[in-house]
Image: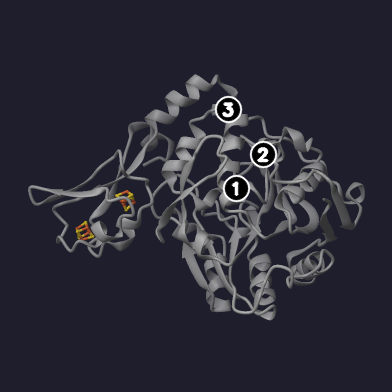
Amino acid sequence: MTSKVSIVPCTDYSLAAEGIRASVDIIGGLSPVIKSGDRVLLKPNVLAARRPEDAVTTHPAIVSEMCEMVREAGGIPVIGDGAGIAFMGATAEAFVASGIAAVAEEQHVELINFQTAGFEKVDVPGAMHFPQLFVSKAVLDADVIISLPKLKTHELTYYTGAVKNMFGALPLKHRKEMHLLAERKLFGEAVIDLYSVAKPHLAVMDGVVGMEGNGPSHGNPVNTGVIMASYEPVSLDIAASRLIGLDPMEVPTTRAALERGLATCKLEIVGVPLEEASVKYKPSNGGILFNVPPFITRIFGRYYSVRPEIDNSRCIRCGACVNACPVNAVVCEGGKLSIDKERCILCYCCREMCPEDAVGSDRSLLAKVLTNA
Ligand code: SF4
Ligand code: SF4
């Protein structure tokens, strides 16, 4: 089977509306994926609390126009993501800094914080590493998922795009477990375990300004001038990695998806020819942890932890955290609440629900040093 991938020129975010419409229209529009009344989850990359011009996060202009297009197609747009692993409350901050919260407000669209909106355990048939995974309820509840990645290099996976963008659907515990696999190939396979149960129906990539070098957050913005779209996220990733001068088979998520038979490598480019749109990106230097042997990475990872902790002096015993916890990890003994570390999946629903701000964070020494806490 051949998948279409569009490449449409778009040199400035003021032209994003036209660019995104053209990129989706020339592959066949939204009607093949959206039915009237569908709940359509727009999943931008809101990795961290960074401004749009930093090129870390999907630009708000792209997300805003997708809201309009989904509505015109008869769907009900919602926006959701879970930010990176640094600290509790990271997603809420990232929504504001990236301009995504403002888009949700202007568009009157529900904004879902994956970190705190709950997770459900799902079976992963044919898993390579995780036969069961907790996945964001918002992702599982959506009728249609649209991945809105940012075109970037990545220190671990070399490139990050439509497939890796779904990583935000995992609670922090799984993200850490996957990173602790400490090898690119294994990490790519684990991300594909997730992708196999949370596969977007459409991917539209913000490649207007991408990021080269030490992405996904420490590289440099680079004017690339494209918006790309495909119903097949792996095909989009193959085309986008070629566009930035990277062999797609070096990207561990792409290789693992093809090996699992979850995609085809036959694709048809529509719009601008790939060679014409190509902008060679500087590669990442491989990151701090991934330039050292895997056993060192595992040791580092084990000593890095940020865990919820209940301050019993503030707690009024309302029980909201007990009810919110999806894995019954909040336990009460001798009239005091505590969190069972073995069960906890680091979703932070307990913190979100607490009316007294009694759920704080317990950071390991390494976490304090790395986050300047
Ligand atoms: S205790 Fe439960 S609700 Fe709180 S972070 Fe852990 S898993 Fe989530
Ligand atoms: S939600 Fe907060 S105040 Fe209520 S029981 Fe839990 S820690 Fe205590």
From the image, tell me which residue sits under label 3: 183
Residue type at the position of mark 2: Arg
Query: First in sequence: mark 1 or mark 3?
Result: 3
Secondary structure of the residue carrying numbered label 3: loop
Position above or below: 306 against 58: above
Nearer to the camera, 267 or 180: 267
Nearer to the camera, 110 or 230: 230
Q: Quadrant of residue 159?
A: top right
CA–CA distance in space, label 3 to label 2 = 18 Å
Neighbor class of circle 1 (other Cα within 10 Å; few <14, some 14-19, many 20+) is some
Residue type at the position of mark 3: Glu
Q: Please say if the residues under marks 2 and 1 sit with CB atoms less than 8 Å apart.
A: yes
Q: Residue at x 71, y 57 (%)?
A: 206
Residue 204 in the image: x percent, y percent?
A: 71, 60
**Would residue 25 be found to the left or right of residue 141 on screen?**
right
Query: Which residue lies most toward the left here?
Result: 334
Secondary structure of the residue carrying numbered label 1: helix
> For the residues carrying marks 3 and 2, which lies nearer the camera in this image?
2
Q: Is mark 1 within 8 Å of ligand 1?
A: no
* Visible residue check, residue 357: no
From the image, tell me which residue sits under label 1: 196
Q: Determine the quadrant in which ligand 2 lies.
A: bottom left
Position above or below: 353 against 290: below
From the image, tell me which residue sits under label 2: 260
Query: First in sequence: mark 3 or mark 2?
Result: 3
Residue 89 in the image: x percent, y percent?
A: 40, 55
